[in-house]
Image (cartoon, rainbow, N blue to C red):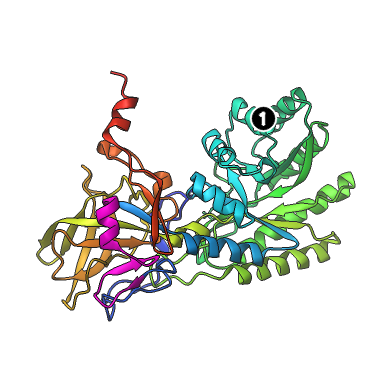
């Protein structure tokens, strides 16, 4: 199946290694620490815990479906990104992956910066006390109101996405008497997914200004000619769920080519390049993501080498991981409702959520795994498909997975690696109530985004 790429997720299943999921795992009770948040473990009684709390207790207290986020893991991931990129580089967490006020505070405390791409994300960040100078404002169609709010708030950088936006931002900044730091987002003709990237002809998408045909150079010329804009660098974001740095290598080569062109034409060496986000995580045991320090080392080497050969000073690097920070830190807990064996095919396991809390499977053919967590089981593996309760046959949460054959209504199952692009893309389809996000740390659990209520739904419906 071929689907167009989206910055929030890949055409992931296209590229799965062959043989994936054709055989059941050796032990259905095993929790692979690649896909589960750090403090998740199975107790001697077979019940899975996170942050020291049993999922059965969590389900009783907070209900299902619900997202449980391992705060210690989130903070540890922030720190390892911040450490890996400290000194000559900056990390911007991509807020679209999942944003809440608690998350903003954690980011602030752990020393990360934050990308926002809408007025709603901007207000969440500011309201939770993130200093505006640590914010980058993205988007391919920021409204004049959003631009004005961002500039008034004092955002550290606005990433310009089109020729019209150059004029728009310059005009608003001038009206406010501000010289606004900006980057230009360019499309470098590289599109990366998982283990592969395509280095030609991928400029057919809505983001950024193409390097091709001298368009990005023309954009730089215009920005440099406007007093109310301060051009601090060039931005490129090449895709999502990327596992190796070869796509970044091509992107950096092309971005640095543009820096050189700008230096030769205008005599200015831009101080920054932003290589975007898109670093992959393990959704299943078949995935092998790289650690932040490996990525940092590879990106530094690539940029240094390219700058040396272009005769440029090495600019500050920024990266924008979203999924790689929050993705692995949360799982979705569901209660099994019905179980329907289809002879010769598979068993359909219906849970109390679905495409309203995880649209990625329907949208991108995303792969997930699933595990029985309210007890251990020695039963034989049963090829299963975990589906939701929505009126749509594409309402699939986990396409193919093995669950124990003694699975029964009332069991709790959990889907790991749902921290990114699940709650943030959740919908009210079928008037579903969007699930809460509960942060768990050191034996304590607290709601950071509460469950929607029927009153919330009715409040919006003015009759
Ligand atoms: C979506 C996006 C990111 C984050 O992507 P992840 O896959 O979550 O790391 C970073 N930068 C930009 C510009 C994006 O659009």
Between 208 and 357, the residue placed more toward the observer is 357
Q: Point out the residue furthest to the right here.
A: 267
Question: Residue 11, can we see it?
Answer: yes
Q: Is residue 455 left or right of residue 326?
A: left
Residue 93 magenta: no
Residue highlighted by disc 1: 164
Residue 61 magenta: yes
Between 67 and 56, the residue placed more toward the observer is 56
Establish if 387 lies above or below 245: above
Establish if 167 lies above or below 130: above
Q: Quadrant of residue 164?
A: top right
Establish if 150 lies above or below 89: above
> What's the residue at 40%, 47% (across, down)?
423
> What's the residue at 46%, 58% (across, down)?
327
Give coordinates of residue 94: x percent, y percent: 56, 50
Quadrant placement of the N terminus: bottom left
Q: Point out the residue furthest to the bottom here.
A: 26
Q: Is residue 211 left or right of residue 259?
A: left
> What's the residue at 76%, 52% (across, down)?
272
Quadrant placement of the C terminus: top left
Give coordinates of residue 337: x percent, y percent: 16, 54
Q: Secondary structure at mark 1?
A: helix
Residues shaded magenta? 41-64
Establish if 403 lies above or below 114: below
Give coordinates of residue 309: x percent, y percent: 82, 65
Q: Point out the residue furthest to the left here.
A: 343
């Amino acid at each position: 199946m071929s689907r167009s790429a989206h910055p929030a997720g890949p055409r992931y299943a296209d590229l799965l290694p062959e043989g994936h999921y054709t055989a059941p795992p050796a032990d259905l009770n095993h929790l692979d620490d690649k896909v589960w948040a750090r403090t998740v473990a199975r107790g001697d009684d077979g019940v899975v815990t996170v942050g020291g709390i049993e999922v059965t207790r969590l389900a009783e207290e907070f209900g299902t479906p619900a997202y449980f986020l391992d705060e210690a893991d989130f903070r540890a991931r922030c720190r390892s990104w911040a450490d890996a990129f400290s000194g000559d580089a900056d990390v911007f967490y991509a807020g679209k992956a999942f944003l809440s006020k608690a998350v903003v505070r954690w980011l602030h405390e752990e020393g990360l910066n934050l990308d926002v791409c809408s007025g709603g994300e901007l207000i969440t960040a500011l309201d939770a006390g993130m200093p505006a100078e640590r914010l980058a404002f993205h988007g391919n169609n920021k409204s004049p109101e959003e631009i004005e709010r961002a500039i008034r708030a004092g955002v550290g950088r606005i990433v310009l996405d089109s020729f019209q936006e150059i004029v728009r931002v310059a005009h608003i900044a001038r009206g406010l008497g501000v010289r606004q730091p900006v980057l230009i987002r360019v499309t470098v003709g590289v599109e990366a997914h998982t283990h592969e990237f395509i280095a030609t002809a991928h400029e057919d998408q809505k983001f950024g200004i193409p390097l091709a045909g001298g368009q990005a150079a023309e954009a730089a010329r215009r920005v440099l000619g406007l007093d109310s804009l301060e051009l601090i660098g060039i931005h490129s974001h090449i895709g999502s769920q990327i596992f190796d740095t070869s796509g970044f290598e091509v992107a950096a080569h092309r971005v640095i080519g543009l820096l050189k062109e700008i230096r030769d034409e205008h005599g200015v060496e831009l101080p920054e390049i932003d290589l975007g986000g898109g670093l992959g995580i393990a959704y299943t045991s078949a995935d092998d993501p790289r650690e932040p320090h490996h990525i940092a080392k590879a990106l530094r080497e690539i940029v240094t080498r390219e700058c040396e050969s272009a005769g440029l000073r090495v600019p500050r690097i920024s990266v924008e991981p979203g999924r790689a920070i929050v993705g692995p830190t949360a799982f979705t807990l569901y209660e099994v409702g019905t179980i329907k064996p289809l002879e010769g095919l598979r068993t359909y396991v219906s849970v109390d959520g679905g495409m309203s809390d995880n649209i990625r499977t329907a949208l991108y053919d995303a792969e997930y795994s699933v595990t029985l967590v309210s007890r251990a089981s020695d039963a034989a593996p049963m090829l299963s498909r975990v589906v939701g309760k929505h009126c749509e046959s594409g309402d699939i949460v986990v396409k193919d997975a093995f669950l124990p054959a003694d699975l029964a209504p009332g069991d709790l199952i959990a889907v790991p690696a749902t921290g990114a692009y699940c709650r943030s893309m959740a919908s009210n389809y079928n008037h579903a109530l969007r699930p809460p996000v509960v942060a768990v740390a050191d034996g304590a659990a607290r709601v950071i985004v509460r469950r929607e209520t029927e009153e919330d739904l009715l409040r919006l419906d003015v009759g």
